[in-house]
Image (cartoon, rainbow, N blue to C red):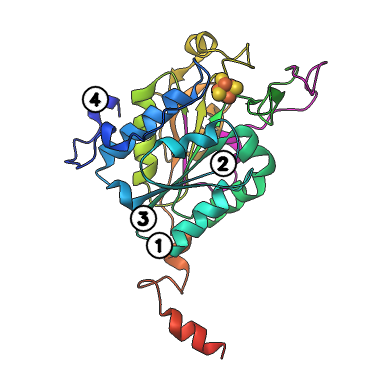
Amino acid sequence: MTADLLPQKKSMTNIKDLETRDKPNWCPGCGDHGILMAVKQAIAASGIEPHNIAISTGIGCGSKLNQWVNTYGNQGLHGRGLPVAMGMKLANPEITVLSVGGDGDGYGIGMGHFINNMRRNIDITYIVQDNQTYGLTLGQTSPTSDKGATGPSTPFGVIEEPVNPIRLALSSDCTFVARGFAGDIPHLADLILQGMQHKGFALIDVLQPCATFNKVNTYKYFRERVKKLENHDVTDLNAAFAKADGLDIGVFYKVSKPTYEDQEPGLRGGHGDVNEVMASFM
Ligand code: SF4
């Protein structure tokens, strides 16, 4: 589905409503600007009122995103955007929950939370700003840095293999797996919208430049290599694995499974009676 085909739902929300008093302070040319706009476009197109949306982030340049979207939100600790997002969803399953963070945040210190949220299939949309760099701490290489990439912590080049988020998600029972590009905002907005509409855990890994510290993976680099997935069956797991290694963007895999909330007895049929639970401990 292209941006032109975004559902024309009647929404009370437009992009202007989602702006906050402060403006983003990311570096000029940072891919986070495009991701922020795509998040706003997806929310506006979803028809969901901002007071029914919460955004949980971790620590990193991109984790400041929730400060500049006029919804509920929380910025937590490094790598802990997902557990807080899970708490938000369990406390109020009626709301739409997004979690946003960088590749270092999510695929480094937050890796355990990432895998456990996928196997639980909790209904969260997880957007990872993947710039292959720890930008906030001045450009160290990250879990997705290419082998041989240099930085302040690896002056002679990375000797490890990079994490492939798509392959990892496919092998962790993630029920919605997608990759976007910060330089194609309409396409990315459509992916985020699809993730929000998916009932279950949705990963959207976003290729984005860090204009200040990553001089290799620039907009030009991505524009020359990124292409949209075509003639791809999103229910075919083997086909998704086969395409995971390139720089294709789009939905790789999508399947329907019961969510964690659906199976949690305490949440079935509503929020449960807290007083009854408390009384059982007396
Ligand atoms: Fe963006 Fe990199 Fe600047 Fe951080 S350091 S705001 S990731 S360009």
Q: Nearer the viewer, mark 1 or mark 4?
A: 1
Please name the predominant secondary structure of the magenta segment in the image.
loop
Which residue is labeled 4 in the image? 4
Q: Which residues are magenta?
A: 150-179
Nearest to N terminus: mark 4 or mark 3: 4
Which residue is labeled 1 in the image? 92
Which residue is labeled 2 in the image? 169
* Label 1 with label 2: CB-CB less than 8 Å: no
Q: CA distance from mark 3 to mark 2?
A: 24 Å
SS for callout 3: loop
* Label 1 with label 4: CB-CB less than 8 Å: no
* Label 4 with label 2: CB-CB less than 8 Å: no
Which residue is labeled 3 in the image? 95
Of 1 and 46, nearer the camera is: 46
Of 74 and 168, nearer the camera is: 74
Residue 259 left/right relative to 8: right
Residue occupying the point 45% across, 38% down: 67
Q: Nearer the viewer, mark 1 or mark 2?
A: 1
Q: Amino acid at mark 3?
A: Ile
Under 8 Å from ligand 1: the CB of mark 2?
A: no
Q: How many marks?
A: 4
SS for callout 2: helix
Q: CA distance from mark 3 to mark 1?
A: 6 Å
Nearest to N terminus: mark 1 or mark 4: 4
Q: Nearer the viewer, mark 4 or mark 2?
A: 4
Q: CA distance from mark 1 to mark 4?
A: 33 Å
Q: Amino acid at mark 2?
A: Ala
Of 34 and 252, nearer the camera is: 34
